[in-house]
Image (tube, rainbow, N blue to C red):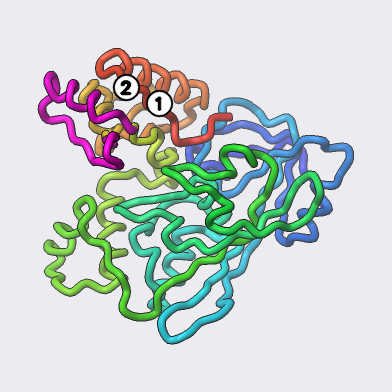
Amino acid sequence: MQIKQNISLKPFNTFGIDVLAKHFISIENIDALKQVISLEEYSNIFILGGGSNMLLTKDIETLVVHVNLKGISILSENEDSVLVQANAGENWHEFVLWCLEKDFGGLENLSLIPGNVGTAPIQNIGAYGIELKDTFISCEALHIATKTLKTFTKTDCKFDYRNSVFKQEEKGEFIICNVTFKLSKKNHTLHTSYGSISDELAGMNITNPTIQDISNAVIKIRQSKLPDPKKIGNSGSFFKNPVILKSAYSKLKENFQDIPGYPVSETEIKVPAGWLIEKAGFKGKQFGNYGVHKAQALVLVNYGNAKGSDILELSILIQNTIKQIFNITIEAEVNIL
């Protein structure tokens, strides 16, 4: 087991922020993971997965443990469904493609989401009307304090919009090692009504789509709106869509007649943060080597060699402006470190 010193984390975060890990190790099996978190000389550790949902603003002084556990397996199956387990270090999109190759349905709307499998439950990732919790069965996580494995069921995870127990009361307490999903083998439930999926399918002259067609449509839509992190540093959607009271939404409608809203309960409306940011004049705005993406106002970008602190300051400016104009608080979706 070799711990490296002063390693740049630029290749390990999708924003492409160049900060140093004073101590760094990549782990490929659970036994090694248990061993490294038991090292007395490193009382604190920083867990790094795919680096897709974080903004690094400073060097990491503690030990950075890169969770690189690989492997996908079928646990059980019948005529209708299959239980598939993927280890935490698997790339999320590559895992989705693996499932689609076998005609396993349920994850197609989540195609091309950046990051790794292990961080997906933390965020309860979602897109185009689907969330991870819809197919989630359980995950196995290593308790850092006791070095024991614990299985978390869907109920245990307390999934909510871009939220879970791993972002709340269990934050920093566990390292997710693998995730198990229940996927369909036939009679797939297709979700085509959210966003512009149906329009994209129509443009592809597809009237009876397969799960592969839906994935292709989602990929095309995401590629048209979101920059490739390999070319332009970004972390996907930087902000959560705020949920406000219907009464507040009705009042906003008086001044902003075109403000979109989606009911989430009898008393609450979800408002697209991207619309708010665009309306506030930030879409496509560039501040030197960083800014807001021209095609999607939810995405903050690093055009090259920006500091994490620069992007953090921009996010705060956007939040303050949205609060001032709309009296709505928008929260960051990414973890800021």
Left or right of residue 72, residue 204 in this image: left
Rendered location of residue 61, percent (x, y): 73, 30
Question: Going 60% across and 48% down the picture, which residue do you hit?
Answer: 49
Residue 237 found in image quarter: top left
First of labels 1, 2 by sequence position: 1
Question: Going 17% across and 63% down the picture, which residue do you hit?
Answer: 201
Left or right of residue 131, residue 305 in this image: right
- Could one spot residue 81 in this view of the protein? yes
Residue 180 found in image quarter: bottom right
Q: Using the image, tell me which numbered label, if any, was put on residue 289.
A: 1
User: Rounded to the nearest whole Å, what is the CA distance between mark 1 and mark 2?
Assistant: 28 Å
Callout 1 secondary element: loop
Q: Amino acid at mark 2?
A: Ile
Q: Quadrant of the N terminus?
A: bottom right
Q: Residue furthest right?
A: 40
Q: Count neighbours of disc 1 (C-alpha within 10 A) and say few if under 14, some if 14 to 19, many if 20 or more.
A: some
Question: Going 63% across and 64% down the picture, which residue do you hit?
Answer: 70
Q: Which residues are magenta?
A: 243-270
Residue on which disc 2 sits: 328
Position of residue 311 relative to residue 36, above or below, is: above
